[in-house]
Image (cartoon, rainbow, N blue to C red):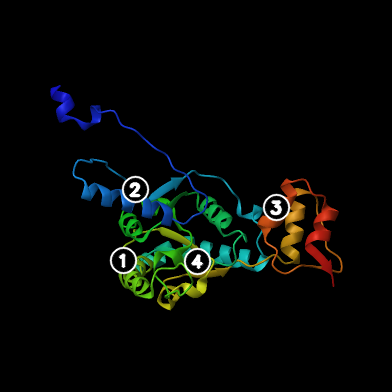
Amino acid sequence: DYFKEKSASIEVKEFLSLTKIGRSHKLFNNLFTEIKNRNSADTSRNTEYYFNEYYRGSRIQLPLKNVVLSDANKNTLLTTIDTFIKKEEWYKENSIPYHLGILLHGPPGTGKTTLIKAIATYFNKGIRVIDNMPCLSLIMGSKLCSEELVAIEEVDTFGIGHDSSKEGDPPKAYNALVAELNLPKMLAVLDGLLSMHGTIIVMTTNHINKIAPAVLRPGRIDLLLEIGYMDVQMFEDMIAKFYSPFTLENRVVKHGITPAQVQQDIIAGMTVDDLVEKYTMKV
């Protein structure tokens, strides 16, 4: 009885796991806010709640050569990464924070998340995924951020950009307050003030127009890479990856086609002829 009264670890605990589709945290944030408010109103309740605000991904080996990417983007990315690796001593000698910031932007389904895995593989690092600004500020000062690639998807949701007037979005006053609090922290991360030596941070966004210009300034983002829709070369590379070497003759890829769309049909077993008919057209 003494230990039951003194140790909460002996008490029987109940766990409830909730899963939702999509990346928005709004549903869970509202749920935990309601729990917290009820606990405050009723002192007889003793529910405790915890937030897992970042997680570490496994080291999935994904060679960059296997990613469907335009030749121009692949060359630009490799040049940036190789230069960063080779110039470590130069950064030290000139007292410049040794960190690399990459922002991938473009429509959904174009392969930004896949490219993060390929970049981590190239550096032989694990991936540390951050999903909110307070957690980013916490983790960037630790040794973890130099040992693993730091990934931030949909960085425009971190409250570092412009106010939005779309239906269902928070009021403008709220957005302005969030930006006022979060923007300086993000700039400190990108300037290297909060990050360890050797930090590599890769961010993605579907809406680059929502990112504050101060974040995009050269010196904070070392590489701003647009991941767009498929072109002829990317389509040929993808067909060759799953079937055999292939060349489109007198045809172009239709506008708005993403690698994710084509891959889904390849997984479903669609033939090359059917893929060509569906996703390309005669010049």
First in sequence: mark 4 vs mark 3: 4
For label 1, the residue is 193
Taking 169 as reference, is 111 above or below it? above
Three-letter code, disc 2: Phe
Q: Residues within 10 Å of mark 3 (few under 14, many from 20)?
A: some
Q: Nearer the viewer, residue 183 or 197?
A: 183
Question: Alpha carbon of mark 3 to alpha carbon of mark 2: how far?
Answer: 35 Å
Judged left or right of residue 123, residue 90 is: left
First in sequence: mark 4 vs mark 1: 4
Question: Alpha carbon of mark 1 to alpha carbon of mark 3: how far?
Answer: 41 Å
Three-letter code, disc 3: Gln
Residue 137 found in image quarter: bottom left
Taking 239 as reference, is 2 above or below it? above
From the viewer's perspective, is the residue at label 3 or at label 2 nearer?
A: 2
Residue 51 is labelled as 2
Determine the secondary structure under disc 2: loop
Q: Residues within 10 Å of mark 2 (few under 14, many from 20)?
A: few
From the viewer's perspective, is the residue at label 2 or at label 4 nearer?
A: 2
From the viewer's perspective, is the residue at label 1 or at label 2 nearer?
A: 2
Question: Alpha carbon of mark 2 to alpha carbon of mark 4: how far?
Answer: 27 Å
Instruction: Kindly check if marks 4 and 3 are in contact, taking CB atoms under 8 A apart as contact.
Output: no
Q: Nearer the viewer, residue 97 or 50?
A: 50
The residue located at (65%, 68%) in the rendering is 72
Spot occupied by residue 178 in the image (x, y as percentages of width and height): 34, 69
Taking 86 as reference, is 15 above or below it? above
